[in-house]
Amino acid sequence: MLRSYEKLYTPQTAAMEHSFIRQILKVTRGVPGMISFAGGLPDPASFPKETLARLFHEVISETGDDVLQYGASEGDVKLKEALKNFEEVPWLPDDQLMITIGSTNGIYYYLRTLISPDDIIVCESPGFPGSIAAMQACGARMIGVEMDELGMRPDRLDETLRDLTRSSAPVKFLYLIPEFQNPSGRSMDLARRREILRTALRYDIPVLEDQPYRELRYSGVRIPTLWELARVEFGDDELVTIVKSFSKILGPGLRLGFAAGPEKIIEPMVKWAQKSTVSPDCITQRVTARFIGEGLMHPHIERIIELYRPKRDAMLETLSLLMPPGISWTEPEGGMFIWLTLPEEINTDRMFDLAIGEKVAFIPGSQFYPAGKKRYNEIRLNFSYPGIAEIREGIERLSALVRREIS
Ligand SMILES: Cc1ncc(COP(=O)(O)O)c(C=O)c1O
């Protein structure tokens, strides 16, 4: 009898764990009176429900014969056209663009294309656990590079790459979230982006740029992506592959994103898609193409910005009013997260249980460190999901707890 499936698992399956963050979210969900800064969810008020309902109806009734069929693995040409207009890159060849099932899916195909067990990926430390877990599940060794207020430090990146080139394992790529980073909320300025690209070029290491929050900018000026900079300033259209997502704009439930990069990367990614998902959801792709085509995207994004900016401001203001001296936090220009640093002696893994007792939840910073050196005195706070009154009340609870911990 073949009933002991555990014995049949591949080594990767046997080693895989459930996401700790998802477990935390389970503990906090549905608890009466709980204020959660733990998740990374959009506010449902940002979902364009009525417009999407109309568009789904129209797309199925007008083009059902087409969109209910199997679709192209590389994505719908109509969505590609709309996207290229929206992203202001009408010149981009279709074979350098792939539609994916959220950006997670794009990151996964990129991994499948490049990663063999024990290959090295260099990323920010702290970084996004969702991607780090996917990378580790493919057998990659993650090497984190220290950050400062402007994201990954180029001097540390240079040192890391210099050390790694002496070792036998190949560094396959750099994984970067240069804007409103998850978890820190930090963004690279233009000079930092250039420096990071120069370093990548010097070591000839490709870059995977993850940009799910780019459209959610509440202050400051828009800066070119690494993908744009590499092409325009460095004349290199092969260095960077970018993944973007509609999750934080239209809704994560739509599961729609895209990847743009050199044909030599996009083509094998599409081959991986053929073997697993066949194609993204054809209806959702066409609905999104119409959403963009009808000129709805820019005003919709403006509305989301107007929804989230006061939430960010309320969190920053309440932190300034109530947190004791010795605590610092990032002031993100966009995105969904603020990163709080407490005195070294405070362990936020331990503080988490106390916070749950006080009915306020966060994610302890230790959860965001790739394997190796972790820090335990940090916290990620989400401000997109809770309402403004909840943000003020939750920060009040958290500040009171921090004061008690410090004394
Ligand atoms: C940095 C980062 N990358 C990727 C994702 C995954 O997004 P998607 O829903 O498009 O798969 C997230 C989601 O929170 C994220 O924060």
Image (cartoon, grey):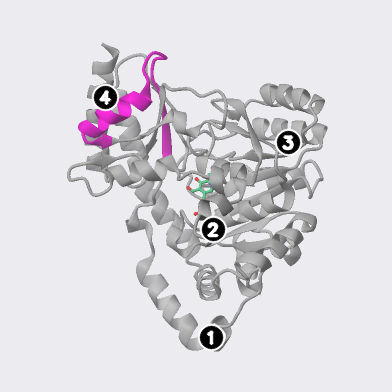
- The quadrant of the rendering that contains the C terminus is top left
Disc 2: which residue: 102
Q: What element carries label 1?
A: helix
Q: How crowded is mark 4: few (under 14 residues within 10 Å), some or many (20 or more)?
A: some
- Does any atom of ligand 1 lie closer than 8 Å to the CB of label 2? yes
Disc 1: which residue: 63
Locate residue 158, reporting x and y percent. Answer: 73, 25
Q: Is mark 2 on a helix, strand or loop?
A: helix
Query: What is the spatial separation of the Cα atoms under label 2 and label 1, in whole angstroms?
Result: 23 Å
Residue 27 in the image: above or below residue 403: below
Nearer-N-terminus badge (2/4)? 2
Q: Is residue 359 on the magenta stretch?
A: yes
Q: Which residue is drawn at 81% across and 37% down?
A: 204
Q: Give the quarter of the image for residue 48.
A: bottom left
Q: Give the quarter of the image for residue 176.
A: top right
Locate residue 402, reporting x and y percent. Answer: 28, 21
Nearer-N-terminus badge (3/4)? 3
Locate residue 318, reporting x and y percent. Answer: 28, 30
388 or 114: which is nearer to us? 114
| Three-letter residue code for mark 1 | Thr
- Return the residue found at the far left: 32
| Three-letter residue code for mark 2 | Gly
- Does any atom of ligand 1 lie closer than 8 Å to the CB of label 1? no
| Three-letter residue code for mark 3 | Leu
Disc 3: which residue: 197
Q: Residue at x 50, y 71 (%)?
A: 284
Residue 85 appears in the rendering? no
Query: What is the spatial separation of the Cα atoms under label 3 and label 1, in whole angstroms?
Result: 44 Å
- As drawn, is 166 to the left or to the right of 345? right
Nearer-N-terminus badge (3/1)? 1
- Segment tinted magenta in the rendering: 337-360
